Amino acid sequence: MADLITASPEIMRGKPVVFGTRITVEFILEQLGHGHTVEELLDGHPRLTREGVEAAIRYAIDALRTERVVKAAAG
């Protein structure tokens, strides 16, 4: 499932996309966040699969899980 998300500088300026599409993880999350359903995404983007949407969500979760906030030094 992790192979479904890929990033390359030649595709969408290096943003992570669902493999074989130009659909970014960011776009999927934005659409879901605006209340669109997975079914609406799939209907609107025939190359997108349910597995691709699920992989995008897992990718985002993993990215946030490993994100760390670093406090800037006082200067």
Image: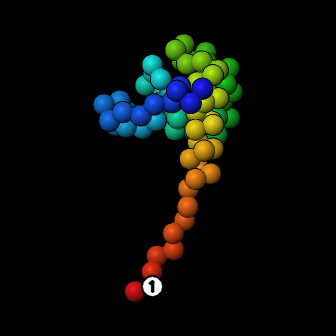
39 sits to left or right of 31 = right
Q: Residue furthest top?
A: 46
Q: Residue furthest bottom?
A: 75
Identify the residue at image location x=62%, y=51%: 65
4 and 26: which is toward the camera: 4
Instruction: Locate residue 54, reporting x and y percent.
Output: 64, 29
7 sits to left or right of 66 = left
Identify the residue at image location x=55%, y=61%: 68
Q: Residues within 10 Å of mark 1 (few under 14, many from 20)?
A: few
Examine the rendering and report whether any part of residue 58 can be seen: yes
Q: How is the image coloured?
A: rainbow
Identify the residue at image location x=56%, y=47%: 63
Q: Amino acid at mark 1?
A: Ala
User: How many numbered marks are there?
Assistant: 1
Dividing the picture into quadrants, the one containing residue 50 is: top right
Image height check: is 21 above or below 16? Answer: above
**Quadrant (top left/top right/bottom left/bottom right) for the C terminus:** bottom left
Q: Residue furthest left?
A: 10
Q: Quickly name the residue at label 1.
A: 74
Instruction: Locate residue 18, reporting x and y percent.
Output: 50, 26
Examine the rendering and report whether any part of residue 34 can be seen: no
Dividing the picture into quadrants, the one containing residue 11 is: top left
33 sits to left or right of 10 = right
Callout 1 secondary element:
loop
Image height check: is 32 above or below 22? Answer: below
Identify the residue at image location x=68%, y=35%: 35
Instruction: Locate residue 52, reporting x and y percent.
Output: 58, 24
**Quadrant (top left/top right/bottom left/bottom right) for the N terminus:** top right
